[in-house]
Image: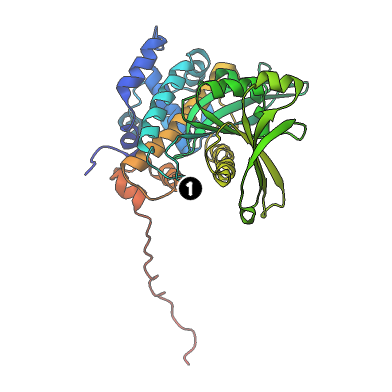
Amino acid sequence: MNSGRNIFAQVMDFLPKKEFAKCVERYEGNKRVRSFSCWDQFLCMAFAQLTYRESLRDIEVCLRAIPNKRYHMGIKGSIARSTIAEANESRDWRIYADFAQVLISQARELYSDDDFGLNLDETVYALDSSTIDLCLSLFPWAKFRKTKAAIKLHTLLDLKGSIPAWIFITDGKVHDVNILDYLLPEAGSFYVMDRGYLDFARLYKINLSHAYFVIRAKTNTKFQRQYSNPVDRSTGLVCDQIGMLSGFYTSQDYPDKIRRIKFNDDETGKTFVFLTNNLLLPAFTITQLYKCRWKVELFFKWIKQHLRIKAFYGTNETAVKTQIWIAISVYVLVAIMKKRLKIDSELYTILQILSLTLFEKSSLFQVVTNLTCTFSKPPLANQLFLFDD
């Protein structure tokens, strides 16, 4: 029995509160705070994500309408739109970024044995970015174009469990390839990227770190073949070549052997050319690795549809980053809960159930797994007949 404890409180039990306190102390988040702590702020924003609140006023009205239930949710501070707005705009967003990384490390450990479609022992990451359009008059700091503002979510996705291993938020003008400067490659891991990240000087640093990359080549990439490996053309492979870059600048930026694989996709009718520094993995496996890169595209689509990261509760940079990091924390929290409770339902299904049952005083496991509904027959209408047959 969970007498007195609602679903929201049970979900928040999966959060490591001691680690959250360390993050708050690291950036002095509760300094000179009297009534609305960082933990209260996190719970209010998590509530907004789980119930799809549209504005700060929406959050305030809903939480003020349930004072007794709000206490059992763990929110001890007073709720006001101005209080939440001030907290989002003034408190260091790195508190929630660091806490999200704590949750990410826990989730990746839980999903480390999951299969993503390829039988590989190495960790495989997909690197990509997604742009969120903003209003220039409200978000002038998010530089993008003359008449448009935007931010970018640069994400390194662990394909096992589709857990974001690393996220970097910039304005829309930052080119994708610059993010490779912030990347710390793990030896033995694979990094799968689109050709927007094609910079051979940066790729060579990945090679020197004993990590592997798989990336699409551009049409003007000059390559000199040294020898070819046999391929099975029935799989769509055209060639598997080992050689050197022959361009004047590219040969200086990447002075080592590189592998070029050409592949015809029967589904789309397109021809793809891949470059990789892994010389041993089967060529067809390399093509399948790149195909798995689409999981990061699905991740962006999912969070934009089911989390509040396209409409923001504040307009300054701190408020925007705070909301995004708390949204990511909620996503990872639900993924952790799904794994620890061994729930077979998808994350979307779990979120939809939670959005309607947060104040129920029932077992969390029972609520998210009881998907069967029974309908009783309607009672016979007590209606007199006007005419006899």
Q: Is residue 73 above or below residue 89?
A: below
**In percent of the image, x 54 and y 17: which residue is there?**
318
Indicate the position of residue 171 as horizontal and vertical percent values: 64, 20
Indicate the position of residue 26 as horizontal and vertical percent values: 39, 11
Quadrant of image for the N terminus: top left
Q: Residue furthest top?
A: 32
Question: Which of 347 and 72 lies nearest the eye of the viewer?
Answer: 347
Instruction: Rate crowding at label 1 as few (under 14), some (14 to 19) or many (20 or more) other CA atoms within 10 Å.
Output: few
Callout count: 1
299 on left or right of 176: left
Q: Is residue 348 above or below residue 234?
A: above
Q: Is residue 35 visible?
A: no
- Residue ID for mark 1: 117
**In percent of the image, x 61 and y 52: which residue is there?**
232
Indicate the position of residue 379 as horizontal and vertical percent values: 38, 72
Question: Which of 344 and 274 lies nearest the eye of the viewer?
Answer: 274
**In percent of the image, x 41 and y 22: which residue is there?**
99
The quadrant in which residue 40 appears is top left
The quadrant in which residue 76 appears is top left
Q: Is residue 198 above or below residue 295?
A: above
Q: Residue furthest bottom?
A: 389
Indicate the position of residue 367 as horizontal and vertical percent values: 34, 48
297 on left or right of 88: right
**Considering the numbered disc 1 on the image, is that residue within a helix, a strand or a loop?**
loop
Describe the colour scheme in one phrase. Answer: rainbow
**In percent of the image, x 77 and y 32: which residue is there?**
220
Question: Which of 139 and 261 lies nearest the eye of the viewer?
Answer: 261
Question: Which of 107 and 328 lies nearest the eye of the viewer?
Answer: 107
Q: Amino acid at mark 1?
A: Gly
Q: Is residue 165 visible?
A: yes
